[in-house]
Image: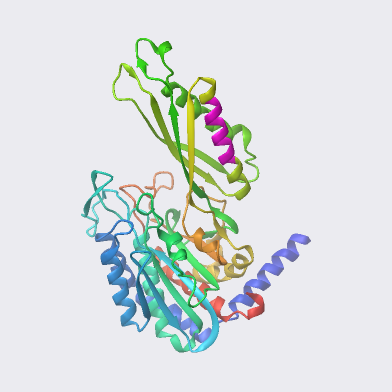
Amino acid sequence: MTKFFLSLAGALLALTTIAQVNPKLQAKVEEQAKQLEPKLIEWRRHFHQYPELSDHEVKTAAYIAEHLKKLGIEVQTGVARTGVVGLLKGPKPGPVIALRADMDALPVTERNSLPFASKEKTIFNGQETGVMHACGHDTHVAVLMAVAEILSQNKSELKGTIKFIFQPAEEGSVPGETGGADLMVREGVLDNPKVDVIFGMHIQSISPLGKITYRPAGMMAASDWFTIKVKGRQSHGAAPWMGIDPIVVSAQIVNGLQTIISRQTDLTKEAAVITVGKFQAGVRENIIPEEAVLSGTIRTLDVDMQKLIHEKIKLTATKIAESAGATADVTIENKTPVTFNNIALTEKMVASLQRAAGAANVASIHAVTGAEDFGFYQQKIPGFFFFVGAMPPDQDPNKVPAHHTPDFMIDERGMLTGLKAMLNVTLDYMNMPAAKK
């Protein structure tokens, strides 16, 4: 009986949210979204063909800024190096709603026969590589440009202000420097006017076309990077007993780190992952080096677990090294916070997603251990982030190319679902009574 009343309450909440928007405006916006789909696809293909790496999105930013200016939207450029912010003020009082899209591509060489495939090349970390939108940020930009166009065409109906945030460097900024969402927040993107709420989406090549998924609370993991420098004593490879082998010690540390997750972390609470992605040591086969360096990432969905795992990494590495007569210096850099969907806000906006995709196509999911710097905004204000499926129907879910790979591909029809979803959450939120926000 309790479940029945909870379900009924959820249904009533959904109906209440849906009822906020003028039905004529809703129908008009729905039709405008459908009519704009060809242009939406055209924009996406342009960005896909001419991708730019993090903090180098100069041409991308210029293209966006020109579009926003043509719509009569107030534009600010050069935010967080290459970011673009647009401000659309409605004639009626209401909240300040931020909508975010990330603009950067990846150092990946595209491997497919698309007529608009990227041919761009660059030097990244001293190596020549291709440049590719291998994570769908090109679709995010195109969708937000379409949202801006449709909302500007309905400006007379808007309550409050819409702030369009086109963000650089979601994939990571210049090494050693702050960038992306973190720098945007530091430079005041959530102020002047002060933002009340923020919405964002991410296209998913591994999720069925037309599906929208979300999770209240921690949806995507915090990503922290660690480096462990193990110092031993150099010796001849024929006489290891005359030195202290940092490679053997480091190998033991790698195994020890995995026991932090498998034996020392309560995984019934949240998921967590420690990955060693780099292991560097030595210059010659018959020389035991003096030093070895391990680098990797830590993924967590809970702040207390995050702190505990950091402590255990330092303890494990230093004590294993000490037991062999070596030393281990551990540094951990907090890169990206948890993408934490405000629980109350999430509950209110589910109905908006259902209207965009159909109730049967919207579902809550388990958290994922991938990371997103959208969490920097959510640390300051309530935010809601969701996934939009764009896996081609003829693809085998077990074989579909993953994000960040040369074969990454999406079904462009998924962008219309994303456009409708972003429009719905925006219009619904601005029309909610203040007491319900």
Q: Position of residue 33 (x, y in %)?
A: 40, 76
Q: Position of residue 284 (x, y in %)?
A: 28, 21
Report the magenta stretch's main SS.
helix
Quadrant in which the C terminus appears: bottom right
Give the residue displayed 29% in from the left and 66% down from the top.
60
- Say whether residue 412 is visible: no
Q: Position of residue 412 (x, y in %)?
A: 35, 63
Q: Position of residue 71 (x, y in %)?
A: 34, 82
- Residue nearest the observer in this picture, 380 or 362: 380
- Say whether residue 39 is visible: yes
Q: Is residue 244 above or below residue 28?
A: above
Is 311 colored magenta in this rendering?
Answer: yes
Quadrant in which the N terminus appears: bottom right
Query: What range is drawn magenta here?
Result: 309-320
Q: How many marks?
A: 0
Q: Is residue 234 above or below residue 209?
A: above
- Residue nearest the observer in this picture, 89 or 240: 240
- Residue nearest the observer in this picture, 44 or 74: 74
Is 96 colored magenta in this rendering?
Answer: no
The colour scheme used here is: rainbow
Answer with left or right where residue 298 lies relative to residue 75: right
Q: Quadrant of residue 393?
A: bottom left
